Amino acid sequence: MKKYILRNLKLLLIVVATSAQAQVLTRNQAVQTALQNNQLIKSAEYEVEYFKQMKKTGSDLGKFAATWMGGQYNSSEKDNNFNLSQSIPFPTAIAAHSKLKKEQLIGSQIKLSIAQNTLVYDVQVAYEQLLYQQAFYKLLQSQDSLYGNFARASSLRYKTGESNLLEKTTAETQLQDVKNQLRQTEADIIILQTKLKTLLKSEERFLPTDQLSKLNYTEATEIKNPELSYLNQQVIVNEQNKRVERSGLLPDITVGYFNQSLVGFQNTRGQEIYYDKKSRFQGFELGVSFPLWLGPQVGRLKAAGFQQEASRQHAEYFQTSLTGEIEQAKLEMARNESSLQYYESNALKNADLILTQASKAYRGGEIGYIEFLQ
């Protein structure tokens, strides 16, 4: 019991050796801390806010124009003209722009989900690796104790003439090899702590409180992959962008109002009437504008079509690759479960028995060091 306590105390000191104050976090706490602090997540959140604001620009009508003109544009008298006008995109174009901004917002939200899923995955993997390295360190400690006893017994046998120098040297070499693995594992633990510190954007390293355990796996009935969703959404975005470019072939509508003076005599219903600057003349205007040269807009439309097809092909390829990776993961899972079941049901129990009996037999001189190492 005393040796067990000392070993675990040493492991604790190793893990916090480079940290003045170590945090103690569960797996879920580590994930939540990373989601709150990680700068990539904050960047993706700002991008969502950007597209939320850009969505409001989908119904942009352009700038309203107000012009004033003064001078001798009618006669030698100085007149003035006040004109209001607004150029409005064709209603179909406005609808296409609005839908594009909406789909871009959805894409940014899915992109945020990708960043969150990736971060959660990285934190959980690093957390599990840290638990594994700590468990592996404990295993090496038990091997260190085992080979330490072997080395002491070999040294005693060598002094009493019961063994040769090769046996003593072999025992010491095995012991040093285990100690070297311990040092490497100590370094691996610190490396993983540093990685998690970066993922969590923390100034302190932390100690995992969860235990290394068998994870349960439940097969999903359908593929729910954020990256695949994002690629499918990009197909929709590019399709909508193509509609926007197509709407560029439609005319813009211009509406306006003018109010002006016409100082001088005007023939009104057959009578010559004098109008001064206080007399105002007004009217409305309505017009359309369209490009005289359609080549550039047609080129943009065709380019949008190619972009849409490229995104569709990319999404289909990713889905095919993802399906293959899932099948491969299932096969690896089945293989690992079979191997784990073997160790849990047979190998570990037999290993304990072999270690116990081999140690007794070696100390009692019933077997040599070759048999003991085997």
Image (cartoon, grey):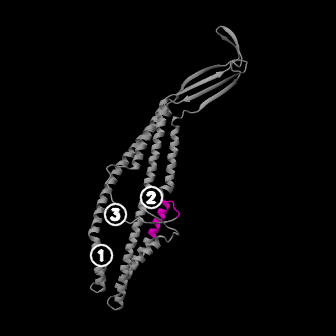
The mark that comes first in sequence, 2 or 3, is 2
Q: Which residue is mark 2?
A: 31
Relative to 20, say whether 361 is above or below: below
Residue 58, given in percent of the width and then of the height, sits at: 51, 37
Secondary structure character of the magenta stretch overall:
helix
Farthest residue in the bottom direction? 160
The mark that comes first in sequence, 1 or 3, is 3
If the image is split into quadrants, where does the C terminus sit?
Answer: bottom left
- Let me know if residue 13 is in the magenta part: no
Relative to 62, say whether 124 is above or below: below
* Residue type at numbered disc 3: Lys
Q: Which residue is mark 3?
A: 214
Q: Secondary structure at mark 1?
A: helix
* Residue type at numbered disc 2: Val
Q: Which residue is mark 1?
A: 352
- In the drawing, does residue 215 fall left or right of residue 199? left
Q: Which stretch did the figure color magenta?
A: 187-203
Residue 202, given in percent of the width and then of the height, sits at: 51, 61
The reply to whether dot 2 and dot 1 touch (C-beta < 8 Å) is no
Disc 2 from disc 1: Cα separation: 37 Å
